[in-house]
Image (cartoon, rainbow, N blue to C red):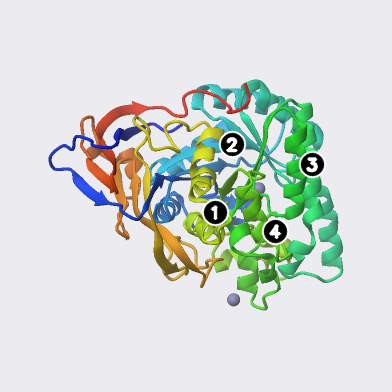
Amino acid sequence: MLNKKVNSFQQVGRNLIIPGGTRIIDATGKLVMPGGIDPHTHLELEMMGAKTADDFYKGTKAAVAGGTTTIIDFVLPNKGQSLLEAYSNWRQKADNKVCCDYALHVGVTWWSPSVKKEMEQLVAEHGVNSFKMFMAYKDAWMLEDYDLMVAMETCAELRALAQVHAENGNIIARNTEKLLEAGVTGPEGHQLSRDEEVEAEAVNRACVIANQANSPLYIVHMMSKSAVKALRIARTRQRPPVYGETLAATVGTDGTHYKNACFRHAAAHVLSPPLRPDPSTPEAIVQALADDDLQLIGSDNCTFNEKEKELGKGNFTKIPNGVNGVEDRMAILWQKAVNTGIMDPCRFVAVTSTTAARIFNLWPQKGRIAVNSDADVVVWDPRLERTISAATHHHAVDFNIFEGQHVVGSPQYVIVNGRVCLDDGNLRVVEGEIVNNSNWGMGETFSFMILVQSLLYQVSSKTFGTRLWPQELRICEYV
Ligand code: URP
Ligand code: ZN
Ligand code: ZN
Ligand code: ZN
């Protein structure tokens, strides 16, 4: 998707021949893992009359600080807007700003035969291989079932992956009318308008429609136990695979915050689907990730400053939807899943990186440490302690939904495309360096070794020049 120069692993193994001048990073006692892949971000998005605080520079900077070296953002066309035009706008926004690799999903936010043609072109000419359809946001992006089915059939035909935002938008619209009439206008109304079954119904319906369309399906941001239950049943029932994604927010915080007396605090937690009031939700979601009832964890990073969230003071339907997470996704999951013994570190790598590479066709360049794969590496220190705070995070946003949480386990080194971007805790990124950096010419050498007890990983100077990725369309497990 992105024209870029690539540094890849040259040698991986024991007893390697080490070229002179090679820097040694001692990772004894640490874990070395492939760079994180966040499959769900919204950087520099205009939505509900507001613009996200994190642009492609600040958002990817925060990502790298937290161990994520690839993000997949969503092109979201306005109703009636050309998908190709929106795609090209996104490329313009991102290319000169990102400081890690990125790929793009494209939203099918309205339907007509011309949209189908544009999807074909996006796949054939731009390597797009995933499209998101909305079953909610009735006045903006929602598709009714007929259009949703045709869109899914189109995805299947194109061998692209259909994604859905699964909530019943019609029920939400009716509940919202009733709540506003009854005088419920605060952030708590957001949650009250869309309970778990409103999400679970849409998950089931999306699965049925995908099965009828003979299309694989990926359900983004799954937020509740009921939704996961519906997914689990569907996964045993249908032939084309269905995948589920949850969010850092879902495992790291909960729906009690909507009752906070401070508007800014409560509104900061407004996202769709909402966080759930059931206190057993976060642990159940972590367990589902560990058990492969859910496959991935994203962030849905979509940050709005206080000024933007205040657009919804007096009417919860006007609160721009979205939270942070791209920086803290990995540390939050480590804390809630690995430190609690629910998940082992290998599964942690699968749900934060490898499976995302496989599902979104970035494999084998991304998501693994092996010769010829991109040199994106995290040296994870399982003993590093820190307290999450908006005062110290790398986002542009003025609030952090994980504020005050103490986590044990964070990246010590983050290597992006063979460059040490987080160096023993010091973040060194440059705006736009992925695409613009002319120092990355052919033959440029970034040579260092990571020493892991007796196992050595060498990352060095092989530069392949410009190439296009993802190069071919393939959906794993569906042949
Ligand atoms: O509340 C959310 N999730 N905001 C971002 C847009 C979306 O639906 O993913
Ligand atoms: Zn969504
Ligand atoms: Zn507050
Ligand atoms: Zn989203």
Tag shown at residue 236: none
Q: Which residue carries the number 4 mark? A: 274
Instruction: Mark 2: give few (<14), some (14-19) or many (20+) Cα within 10 Å.
Output: many
Image coordinates of residue 345 in percent, x first then y, are 49, 50
At mark 2, the secondary structure is strand
At mark 4, the secondary structure is loop
Q: Is residue 8 above or below residue 33?
A: above
Give the Cα distance between marks 3 and 4.
Answer: 18 Å
Q: Amino acid at mark 3?
A: Asn
Q: Which residue carries the number 1 mark? A: 301
Give the Cα distance between marks 4 and 2.
Answer: 23 Å
Q: Can residue 161 be spotted in the picture?
A: yes
Q: Quadrant of residue 458?
A: top left
Give the Cα distance between marks 3 and 1.
Answer: 25 Å
Q: Earlier in the sequence, mark 2 or mark 3?
A: 2
Mark in the foreground, 3 or 1: 3
Depth check: give the residue in front, 23 or 246.
23
- Please tell me which residue is depicted at 64% across the width and 46% down the height of the picture: 291
Q: Is residue 103 left or right of residue 20?
A: right
Q: Which residue carries the number 2 mark? A: 106
**Do callouts 2 and 3 mark residues in contact (Cβ within 8 Å)?**
no
Q: Earlier in the sequence, mark 4 or mark 2?
A: 2
Image coordinates of residue 380 in percent, x first then y, are 39, 54
Mark in the foreground, 1 or 2: 1
- Please tell me which residue is depicted at 71% across the width and 62% down the height of the picture: 276
At mark 3, the secondary structure is helix
Q: Is residue 305 above or below residue 349?
A: below
Tag shown at residue 204: 3
Q: Amino acid at mark 1?
A: Asn
Instruction: Mark 1: give few (<14), some (14-19) or many (20+) Cα within 10 Å.
Output: many
